[in-house]
Image (spheres, rainbow, N blue to C red):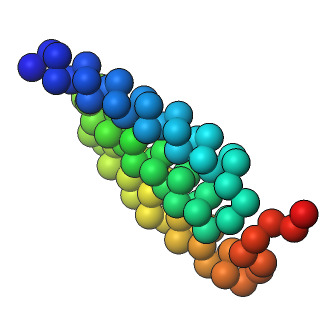
Amino acid sequence: MNTILTILIVVGAIILVGAAIFAVVKRDLILATVATSVISLILSIFYFILQAPDVALTEAAIGVALTTIIFIVTIRNTKRFEDD
């Protein structure tokens, strides 16, 4: 069981770093917002693994759902792509 947990943490950390790099490099703001949502989802899973389910639920609700919705609505009302 401990090996599976270690593998899950390593894979989650790799996805976390990859999503962070993707969010910074990507010029499409919607895709960058989705990447930040993935970051929040992975962090929520990490909080749950660390036995903090209240923090995990809060991160999932605010970080994944509410913040992503606010960002997407704002991007839809402005330009979708960053100017050169």
Is 22 placed left or right of 37 in the picture? right
Q: Give residue 73's quadrant in the image.
A: bottom right
Q: Give residue 11's quadrant in the image.
A: top left
Q: Residue furthest top?
A: 2
Tell me residue 3's x, y (percent). 17, 16
Q: Is residue 17 above or below residue 27?
A: above
On the question of residue 35 being in view, the answer is yes
Q: Residue furthest left?
A: 1
Q: Is residue 28 above or below residue 4?
A: below
Q: Nearer the viewer, residue 13 or 73?
A: 13
Tell me residue 35's x, y (percent). 53, 53
Q: Residue furthest bottom?
A: 77
Tell me residue 24's x, y (percent). 69, 46
> Which residue shows up at 40% across the image and 58% down it?
61
Is 20 placed left or right of 55 in the picture? right
Q: Nearer the viewer, residue 32 or 54?
A: 32
Is 16 placed left or right of 30 in the picture? left
Q: How many marks?
A: 0
Q: Give residue 6's quadrant in the image.
A: top left
Q: Nearer the viewer, residue 1 or 71?
A: 1
> Which residue shows up at 44% across the image and 31% down it?
14
Q: Quadrant of the N terminus?
A: top left
Tell me residue 12's x, y (percent). 37, 34
Q: Quadrant of the C terminus?
A: bottom right
> Which residue shows up at 55% across the image and 52% down it?
36
Q: Is residue 28 above or below residue 3?
A: below
On the question of residue 55 being in view, the answer is no
Q: Is residue 65 above or below residue 37?
A: below
> Which residue shows up at 26% across the image and 29% down it?
8
